[in-house]
Amino acid sequence: IEVGSLMALVGPNGAGKSTLIKTILKFLKQITGEIKINAKTLAYVPQRNSVDWDFPTTLFDVVEMGCYGRVGLFKRVNKKDRQISELSGGQQQRAFIARALVQEADIYLMDEPFQGVDSTTEKSIVEILKQLKAEGKTIIVVHHDLQTVPAYFESVALINKAVIVSGKVSEVFTSENIDVTYRKI
């Protein structure tokens, strides 16, 4: 994955997209292969369904977690409380994206960041991702909407238990490669 790229990880459910992200982050032990990261900081947006929304924390606390690397663990910033479980699905998703953004990371790993958001919010998130790319940041996004891949991303990796193909959307995001990835042929 090139530095400063905006890449989609696309494939069927169970293909290993989230596992790949978690392995890059060292949340899961790597079994084979090699992962080399040429970056100092990584930020992560988890899948909405992997978060315990009843955990007693506020919106502010979630976003503040992203600041610890810059301001230190025991320094606090101004606070406004709102229980995270009281937020809509889209608001919850935006909270975790905000947490990632305040980290000012070199690489952003996002596991389905558009899940649960409306189309206006989705477009706003895409604009933020494109701005991060323009700043030289690398963004890797698990994505399921095949129709929006060409509009949102410059590169794509089609995955189904292994990388089927990876490269520029204009070159590798073809019907044939999609069919192979989703085992339609």
Image (spheres, rainbow, N blue to C red):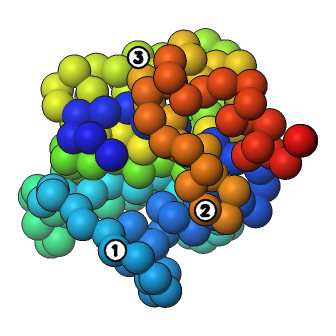
Q: Tell me the residue at 36%/40% (across/down).
A: 139
Q: Nearer the viewer, residue 99 or 17?
A: 17
Q: Is residue 69 visible?
A: yes
Q: Identify residue type, mark 3.
A: Glu
Q: Position of residue 5 (x, y in %)?
A: 31, 33
- Judging depth in this view, the residue of 105 and 137 nearest the camera is 137
Amino acid type at mark 1: Glu
Q: Is residue 82 visible?
A: no
In the picture of the structure, the residue carrying the numbered disc 2 is: 162
Query: In the visual, does 37 lie left or right of 65?
Result: left
Element at badge 1?
Answer: loop
Where 155 falls versus 25 (above or below)?
Answer: above
Q: Can you give x and y, in whole percent of width and height, for residue 82 in the image?
A: 52, 48
Q: Earlier in the sequence, mark 3 or mark 2?
A: 3
Are the residues at dot 3 and dot 2 in contact (C-beta closer than 8 Å)?
no
Furthest residue toward right: 184
Q: Quadrant of residue 62?
A: bottom left
Residue under pointer 3: 127
* Residue 144: image location, x then y, percent: 70, 38
Label 3 secondary element: helix
Which residue corresponds to mark 1? 34
**Numbered-mark total:** 3
Looking at the image, tell me whether mark 1 or mark 2 is earlier in sequence order.
Answer: 1
Q: Provide the secondary structure element on which disc 2 rests.
A: loop
Q: Earlier in the sequence, mark 3 or mark 1?
A: 1
